[in-house]
């Protein structure tokens, strides 16, 4: 397809309550929305690295500038024939997966519009519904956490994810397991620990968790391999798998037994599908994660999650979970699967930003044409 114009919007979306993890606290989600135009047809992509480079080395203001000054000019006025072609055109610029993801996801959404085909079908999916899990950040008290978990389990969520960091770790986990002995639970460490914390994870083995998500350094696959050799609980890589090459290394080193795939972190849907396929061939199950995107980005995650090797319940949330009012219309909502489990359904048409809300929440914008 011929790319005629790219519009970029750095937005800051206020959360209902702060999101606390091992790397800090966010009151807003800073994201980059990308509108890509071919002829009279346009579509939207999104990438949300947050306001500061704490989850990864990238941040919203940085990827806005990079896309405006370097990446988008590589595409505008060009005939971009595939996701692989887009990635090759951007490969001159090292790293910067979140920045590339904004453009890659917009390209796939635009292709969906031009071909009048649902995005999940273009990505190679055959199913149309998947289960989702419930997530809990670091809260003000254990009572608040336990109450929320109890409600989530009563509502049928098939697994629980708990943020895990120094000061909110083993005692918290013990309190949760005391009330919920067998329900599937895993912890997300957001790179908050090191291999010297091996004994802590060996102790956590006693809680029969589904996985340890990203326990060690954000860019590491070597120490994770050592940790996986010395614990019973499966290790899941998230931040460490930031491109296809890292996934290949993690598989070769046996650094993990699960992989969380986020389109933003991994450079877009093109790379997400490639990593999914690598893991499937290696017998490593995957699941789709999110970055608290608006319904624009969340719907892209929904489409990706329909692929066969995404077998663990996804991190995909209804808009109302984090936002009083989503930036995009329609907002993302959960459904009930036939067995009563909360889930999401593939969309025939992707959401787009509400113009008034977009103007209100935009920090800066740019046009490349």
Image: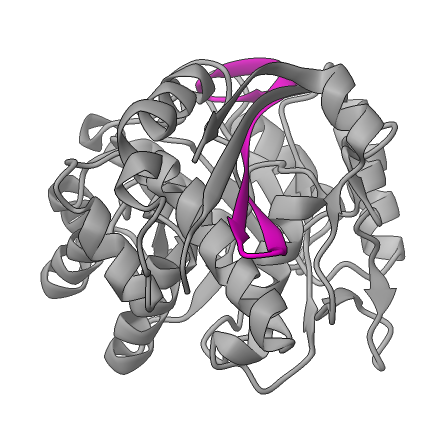
Residue 306 appears at what percent x and percent y? 58, 74
Color encoding of the figure: one colour
User: Which residue sits at x=48%, y=39%?
Assistant: 6
User: Which residue sits at x=86%, y=31%?
Assistant: 325
Q: Is residue 135 above or below residue 24?
A: below
Q: Does residue 113 show up magenta in the picture?
A: no
Task: Please state which of residues 272 and 206 is positioned toward the viewer in this rendering.
Answer: 272
Apparent side of residue 228 relative to residue 102 in the rendered image (left or right):
left
User: Which residue sits at x=83%, y=26%?
Assistant: 356
Task: Please state which of residues 203 and 340 is positioned toward the viewer in this rendering.
Answer: 340
Q: Among all residues in the image, which is located at the extreme bottom?
A: 126
Q: Does residue 34 show up magenta in the picture?
A: yes
Q: Is residue 86 above or below residue 99?
A: below
Q: Give, as a single range, the part of the protein colored magenta.
A: 18-45
**Res. 59 visible in picture:** yes
Apparent side of residue 317 relative to residue 95 in the rendered image (left or right):
right
The C terminus lies in which quarter of the figure? top left
Residue 256 appears at what percent x and percent y? 27, 57
Residue 307 appears at what percent x and percent y? 51, 76
Apparent side of residue 206 relative to residue 76 in the rendered image (left or right):
right
**Res. 230 visible in picture:** no
The N terminus lies in which quarter of the figure? bottom left
Residue 343 appears at what percent x and percent y? 76, 65
Q: Is residue 114 above or below residue 43?
A: below
């Amino acid at each position: 397809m011929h790319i005629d114009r790219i519009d970029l919007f750095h937005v800051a979306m206020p959360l209902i309550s702060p999101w606390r993890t091992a790397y800090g606290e966010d009151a807003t989600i800073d994201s980059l929305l990308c509108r890509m135009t071919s002829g009279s047809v346009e579509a939207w992509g999104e990438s949300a690295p947050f306001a500061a480079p704490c989850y990864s080395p990238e941040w919203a203001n940085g990827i806005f500038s990079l896309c405006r000054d370097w990446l988008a000019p590589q595409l505008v006025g060009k005939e971009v024939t595939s996701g692989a072609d887009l990635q090759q055109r951007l490969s001159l610029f090292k790293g910067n997966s979140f920045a590339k993801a904004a453009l890659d996801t917009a390209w796939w959404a635009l292709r969906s519009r031009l071909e009048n085909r649902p995005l999940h079908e273009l990505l190679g999916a055959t199913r149309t519904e998947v289960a989702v899990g419930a997530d809990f950040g670091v809260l003000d008290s254990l009572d608040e956490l336990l109450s929320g978990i109890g409600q989530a389990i009563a509502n049928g969520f098939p697994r629980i994810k708990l943020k895990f960091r120094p000061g909110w770790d083993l005692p918290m986990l013990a309190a949760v397991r005391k009330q919920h002995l067998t329900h599937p639970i895993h912890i997300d460490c957001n790179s908050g620990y090191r291999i010297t914390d091996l004994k802590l994870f060996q102790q956590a083995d006693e809680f029969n968790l589904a996985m340890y998500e990203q326990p060690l350094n954000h860019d590491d696959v070597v120490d994770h391999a050592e940790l996986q050799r010395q614990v019973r609980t499966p290790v899941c890589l998230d931040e460490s798998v930031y491109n296809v090459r890292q996934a290949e290394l993690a598989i070769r080193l046996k650094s993990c037994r699960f992989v969380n795939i986020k389109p933003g972190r991994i450079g877009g849907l093109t790379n997400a599908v490639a990593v999914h396929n690598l893991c499937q061939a290696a017998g490593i199950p995957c699941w789709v994660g999110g970055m608290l995107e608006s319904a624009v980005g969340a719907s892209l995650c929904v489409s990706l999650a329909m692929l066969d090797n995404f077998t663990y319940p996804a991190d995909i949330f209804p808009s109302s979970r984090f936002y009083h009012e989503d930036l995009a219309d329609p907002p993302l909502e959960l459904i009930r699967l036939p067995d009563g489990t909360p889930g999401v359904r593939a969309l025939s048409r992707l959401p787009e930003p509400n113009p008034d809300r977009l103007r209100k929440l935009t920090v800066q914008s740019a046009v490349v044409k």
